[in-house]
Image: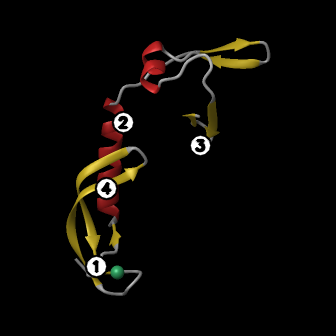
Amino acid sequence: MTAIICGKCRQEMQEVELEQYEFEEGIVLENVRAMRCPQGHVTFTEEQAQEMERRSEDIKKHAFRFVRSVSKSARSLVIRIPADLAKHLDINENSKVEMIPLGKKKFMIEVK
Ligand SMILES: [Zn+2]
């Protein structure tokens, strides 16, 4: 394997294991393999990044999720929030939420 040089300080990087790393927002992985230089800059090889992606996907698959159909109300579309999720998020009929599109097939709802 050829040496990996730090893009910030040009020093050689060594493989280390990070105690925790948040590869995706809200998903914290433990004991993550990474490359680190003597200055403490961190980067990931393609193989390490793929491993983190695979582990993040695994966690998402096992996280609790709800599937609901979209219905219509006047000109708007309605998605019902399951009672368990509402309780978990502490939202009620007076809550305000912000909807943020994340690409074409995803959006995030943030409780205000
Ligand atoms: Zn560095």
Residue that mark 2 sits on: 60
Viewer-side residue, 94 vs 103: 94
Q: CA distance from mark 4 to mark 2?
A: 16 Å
Residue 56 falls in which quadrant of the image?
top left
Name the N-terminal-most of marks 4 and 3.
Answer: 4
Q: Residue at x 58, y 36 (%)?
A: 105
Amino acid at dot 1: Cys
Residue that mark 1 sits on: 37
Q: Which mark is residue 68?
A: none
Q: Which residue extends farthest bottom?
A: 10
Name the N-terminal-most of marks 3 and 1.
Answer: 1
Question: SS of the residue at dot 1?
Answer: loop
Residue that mark 4 sits on: 21
Residue that mark 3 sits on: 102
Amino acid at dot 2: Lys
Q: CA distance from mark 1 to mark 2?
A: 31 Å
The response on whether ligand 1 sits within 8 Å of label 1 is: yes
Amino acid at dot 3: Leu
Amino acid at dot 4: Tyr
Crowding around mark 3 (Cα neighbors within 10 Å: few <14, some 14 to 19, many 20+) is few
Residue contact at pointers 3 and 1, CB within 8 angstroms: no
